[in-house]
Image (cartoon, helix red, strand yellow):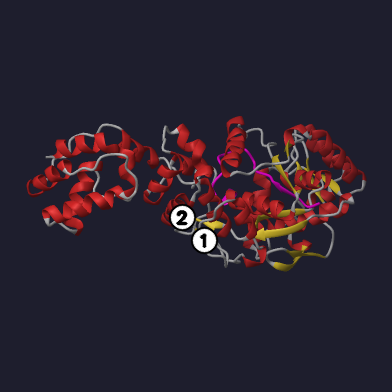
Amino acid sequence: MSVFRFAPSPTGFLHLGNARTLMLNALLARKSGGRMILRLDDTDVARVREEYAEAVRDDLAWLGVAVDAEYRQSERAALYSAAFERLREAGRLYPAYETEEELDLGRRLARASGRPPVYDRRALTLTKERRAALEAQGRRPHWRFRLSDGRIGWKDGVRGPQEIDLASLSDPIVARDDGGFLYVFTSVVDDADLGVTDVVRGEDHVTNTAVQLDLFAALGAPPPAFAHHNLLTTADGAGLSKREGSLSLGSLREQGVEALAVAAYATLIGSSEAVRPVADLEELAGLIDLGKLSRSPARVDPEELSALSAKTVHGLAYHAVAPRLEALGVGGGAAFWETVRGNLARLDEAADWWRIATAPLGTVPAAHEDAALLAEAAASLPSEPWDERTWKTWTSALSSATGRKGRGLFAPLRLALTGEPHGPELARLLPFIGRARALERLHRST
């Protein structure tokens, strides 16, 4: 069985770019009948906050993503320690004592001399006496993983065959001087332990993949299949950021953007599949093909997302929205929903039209030239019961009596009956307004 995972760090609120990674993994798991794991990479104690972890769960629930299991790296330290000891005993780890300032200086000097800013493994030349002297000064070592010699390659699910010369990379730090383990290491240990078979993530992790494949080999664990999708950017080409709150899922939710539209947009943008509304996640899963993703970054257009959200609302079946409409106090069942949905930009606007149809309206004075028309409209208002044919019967008789046609007939009636110049088809809305309210509104407008 295939096993996918989404592994956010709860150090900020998820944004649309995170949703891309999430949805690709969740939909591929759904499509393949596999498992979906949520792993919270919460070892950065200084920046991790529980409210961010809760927000991750809220965002997944909003997008309709159910996970089969949840893990937190902060609860798996024993597993990392055991893997760390195995690597150390195998001679693949070594202690290093440079400060961040010293490392930064070394990188700048390398660049100035035309060399790549790769760590030169100087810590391997330290004698026991020198290490003891450094520790006597209060320094504690961080630990690096010694990369293998040569090149390492894999078949990427998006980018095709990839190969990286490990000599072009610095030996990664796997443990800080305070004993905390770092992502490049813990992620490998987790993926191996949890049986992850497929890792779909952003192309900014390509170099990490080369390092992690070497770590998998050192631990004797089979690696998952890797695929690196293109990234989303803002309109000016800047990357999305959790720290800056760029297009956060929470803010989109507050704006009334449909979750299904966010899922579709995050999944389809930057691919050869046209961005379009879908009926549900099952349909969206059927559109997933990693081979159709572009290699270039995809720029997010908030207006395009808003338009997609409105189109998504227009296509939502009543059964899919009934609980939300009930929570908004909207009645009328499927008939009312089908009457108004085509005129909504956001689902919550259905409550406005329910109020317009069923609650008292303020007076909307008619233009002087329309007063006689509205008086005649009130006098000729048909008796109930009303259905969708009532509007045509009424307005046909009214047109014959007044000579009014087209906009000259319908616009004054719409304004008097709803208080709005535009809106749902009145033939379908009129039965919800009812004769008593319609009569009162016509009288109040004259």
Describe the element under mark 1 as helix, strand or loop. loop
Q: Which residue is mark 1?
A: 275
Mark 2–mark 1 contact, CB under 8 Å? yes
| Residue 352, horizontal then vertical, whole percent | 34, 38
203 or 304, which is in the foreground? 304
Q: Which residue is mark 2?
A: 308
**Main SS, magenta residues:** loop
**Identity, as a three-letter code, of the amino acid under mark 1:** Val
Describe the element under mark 2 as helix, strand or loop. helix
Residue 135 inside the magenta-drawn segment: no
Q: Characterize the local packing of mark 2: few (<14), some (14-19) or many (20 or more) Cα atoms within 10 angstroms.
A: many
| Residue 367, horizontal then vertical, whole percent | 10, 46
Determine which quarter of the picture holds residue 97. Answer: top right
Q: In this rendering, would 424 be left or right of 254?
A: left
| Residue 423, horizontal then vertical, whole percent | 30, 49
In the image, which residues are magenta? 1-18
Which residue is located at x 67 percent, y 50 percent?
Answer: 26
